[in-house]
Amino acid sequence: MKYRRFGKTNWDVSEISLGTWQVGGKWGSGFDDKLAESIINEAIDHGVNFIDTADVYENYQSEAAVARVVRSRSEDVYVATKCGRHLNPHGNESGRCFEGNRISKCCFSSDNL
């Protein structure tokens, strides 16, 4: 695996990342935790240390699978997640949708992980 320095950090991030939209099965088909964890572990076993996920990937289940695997591993794994689809109100009509406290609640709620 090849790695690159991430910006001005000291993080050496794999050139190949794992996108987790599909790791638990087909879109809308139900989520298979064992399959998801197997795929994520396999990627890390092969040197992938950058994982992409989002709150809408099977209604937080992809994020939860990533969290379980990353917590169980000793390697440094970097996770990028996207948020906003579960913010209420959705959209930016109010001008407040993407305030920091709303995003933090969406991303870091223990109920979601």
Image (tube, rainbow, N blue to C red):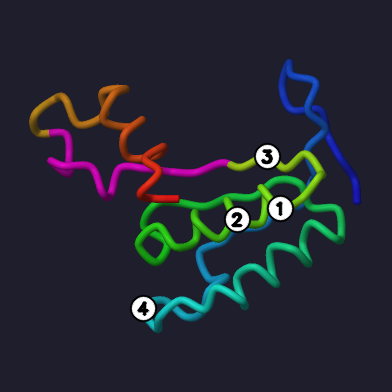
Q: Secondary structure at mark 1?
A: helix
Give how far across and how far down residue 34 sits, in percent: 61, 76
109 and 45: which is toward the camera: 109
The residue carrying mark 2 is 68
Which circle's residue, 2 or 3, is located before the other in the chain? 2
- Tell me the residue at 39%/52% (across/down): 55
- Tell me the residue at 71%/53% (across/down): 72
Choose mark 1 or mark 4, whichever is in front. 1
Are the residues tagged 1 and 4 within 8 Å (C-beta)? no
The residue carrying mark 3 is 78
Give how far across and how far down residue 63 sits, in percent: 49, 54
Task: Return the residue found at the far top.
Answer: 8
What whole-number distance in Å separates the C-alpha atoms at marks 4 and 3?
26 Å
Q: Is residue 68 magenta?
A: no
Judged left or right of residue 4, residue 60 is left
Which circle's residue, 2 or 4, is located before the other in the chain? 4
Choose mark 2 or mark 4, whichever is in front. 2
- The stretch of residues the image draws in magenta is 80-92
Binning the other alpha carbons within 10 Å of mark 2 as few (below 14), some (14 to 19) or many (20 upward) gives some
Which circle's residue, 1 or 4, is located before the other in the chain? 4
Are the residues tagged 2 and 1 within 8 Å (C-beta)? yes
What whole-number distance in Å separates the C-alpha atoms at marks 1 and 4?
27 Å
Give how far across and how far down residue 25 sits, in percent: 51, 79
The residue carrying mark 1 is 72
The residue carrying mark 4 is 28
Judged left or right of residue 1, residue 97 is left
Q: Amino acid at mark 4?
A: Gly
Q: Secondary structure at mark 4?
A: loop
Above or below, 41 against 28 in this view is above
